[in-house]
Amino acid sequence: QVQLVESGGGLDQAGGSRRLSCTASLLTFNLYPMAWFRQAPGKGREFVARITSNGDRVDYTSSVKGRFTISRDNFKNAVYLQMNNLNPEDTAVYYCNALNSARTPLWSWGQGTQVTVSS
């Protein structure tokens, strides 16, 4: 059972920046595409960003393009989400997960990390 641990959440003002981290408990982390998702209050979980297994390609949902950057460090079994120019619509619990061939989440979800942005 892979364990995902997200961290780095907190309270920010609009326009602020924050970096989220996620670590996975498996030795073959470098084989998996990874992604960040988020779930805002009262809404379903949505895709935010993804990165290929070796980090050579990334993709973002339109609402975060130009503001968020996904990256990974396969030596540390970690994936990151740098979030800049935050706005209140970014308020959500953020989760990471691996992606299967259908680009859907592969593992059980971690506890997530809460990001709250005030106006």
Image (spheres, grey):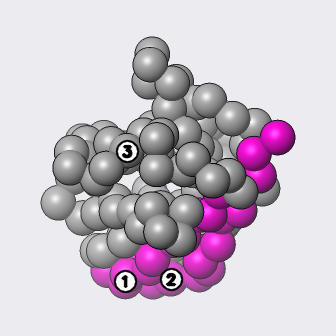
Secondary structure mainly formed by the magenta segment: strand
Q: In which quadrant of the rendered view does residue 114 lie? A: bottom right
Question: Which numbered circle lies on residue 16?
Answer: 1
Q: Position of residue 104 (x, y in %)?
A: 52, 24
The answer to whether residue 119 is visible is no
Q: Quadrant of the C terminus?
A: bottom left
Residue at 51% x, 24% y is 100
Magenta-tinted stretch: 1-24
- The first of marks 3 and 1 along the sequence is 1
Q: Is residue 11 above or below residue 117?
A: below
State the residue position of label 2: 12
Element at label 1: loop
Q: Tag 2: residue type?
A: Asp
Q: Position of residue 52 (x, y in %)?
A: 33, 42
Q: Tag 1: residue type?
A: Gly
Residue at 46% x, 41% y is 31
State the residue position of label 3: 53
